[in-house]
């Protein structure tokens, strides 16, 4: 079985889209794959309840409980590795991961970022796109490397930036596309994973 572990920090709508697609498209039969666990660094992440509703193992590894990033990442890796993992999916996981963690899961670690990378890595992507006068914005699914919001691009989606857009309005438009491209990119990766 190819086990997917999804890391979240908040609402978990990308995680839910992946779980929905896995069920709808029978990833279990097609790829021998399943979402084995959802792990959040915040106990109040809304996505945890969504995962539990789907009877998916939902855990919290609270970064605030550790004195250092290394300590937090060691515990996070231990929680992930309990699942005989094939793929780690960052879905709105809002902690920067260090090089040790990234190299441990090299080739098996993917992220979605709400901009058309390499434009606007980091935070506040939607406001920055509006402020720059961008006519289009979007989202990028990529392999994770040690550099923040970099790495080989697996898929992208483009949306228009409208004249009256607020950051929230643009974020909502981008998010609907994230829900399409993230499950699709993962489904394309699964046959290559062990
Ligand atoms: C998504 O827009 C995702 O791209 C973004 O956080 C949101 C999480 O939403 N991720 C980042 O900004 C990572 N740097 P969700 O919890 O509903 O999936």
Image: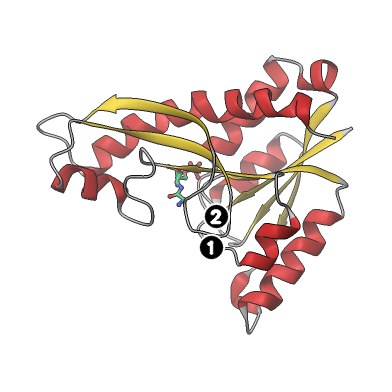
The response on whether ligand 1 sits within 8 Å of label 2 is yes
Viewer-proximal residue, 48 or 150?
150
Question: How far apart are the two marked residues, 1 and 2, measured between alpha carbons?
Answer: 8 Å
Q: Tell me which corner region of the image, top left, top right, bottom left or bottom right, holds residue 87.
A: top right
Task: Give coordinates of residue 103: x percent, y percent.
Answer: 70, 59
Is residue 105 visible from the viewing direction of this image? Answer: yes
Q: Quadrant of the C terminus?
A: top right
The residue positioned 79% from the left and 59% from the top of the image is 79
- Position of residue 191 relative to residue 69, above or below, is above
The residue positioned 61% from the left and 62% from the top of the image is 41
**In this view, the mark in front (1 or 2):** 1
Q: Tell me which corner region of the image, top left, top right, bottom left or bottom right, holds residue 37.
A: top right
- Position of residue 188 relative to residue 75, above or below, is above
Q: Residues within 10 Å of mark 2 (few under 14, many from 20)?
A: many
Q: Residues within 10 Å of mark 1 (few under 14, many from 20)?
A: few
The response on whether ligand 1 sits within 8 Å of label 1 is no
Residue lying furthest left in this view? 163
Is residue 61 visible from the viewing direction of this image? Answer: no
Q: Are marks 1 and 2 in contact (CB under 8 Å)?
A: yes
Give the mark nearer the N terminus: 1 vs 2: 2
- Position of residue 184 relative to residue 167, above or below, is above
Q: Secondary structure at mark 2?
A: loop
Which circle marks residue 145 in the picture?
none
The residue positioned 60% from the left and 38% from the top of the image is 15
Residue position marked by numbered label 2 in the rendering: 9
Residue position marked by numbered label 1 in the rendering: 95
* For residue 13, side relative to residue 71 (left or right): left
């Amino acid at each position: 079985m190819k086990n997917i572990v999804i890391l979240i920090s908040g609402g978990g709508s990308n995680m839910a889209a992946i779980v929905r697609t896995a069920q709808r498209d029978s990833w279990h039969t097609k790829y021998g794959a399943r979402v084995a666990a959802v792990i959040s660094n915040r106990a109040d992440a809304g996505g945890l309840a969504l995962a539990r509703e789907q009877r998916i193992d939902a855990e919290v590894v609270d970064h605030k409980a550790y004195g250092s990033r290394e300590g937090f990442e060691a515990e996070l890796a231990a929680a992930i590795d309990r699942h005989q993992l094939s793929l780690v999916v960052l879905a709105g996981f809002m902690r920067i991961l260090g090089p040790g963690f990234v190299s441990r899961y090299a080739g098996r670690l993917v992220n979605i970022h709400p901009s058309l990378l390499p434009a606007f890595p980091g935070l506040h992507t939607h406001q920055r796109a509006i402020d720059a006068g961008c006519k289009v914005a979007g989202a990028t699914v990529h392999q994770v490397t040690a550099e923040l919001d970099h790495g080989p691009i697996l898929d992208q989606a483009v949306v228009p930036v409208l004249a009256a857009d607020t950051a929230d309005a643009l974020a909502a438009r981008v998010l609907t596309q994230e829900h399409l491209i993230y499950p699709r990119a993962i489904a394309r990766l699964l046959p290559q994973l062990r």
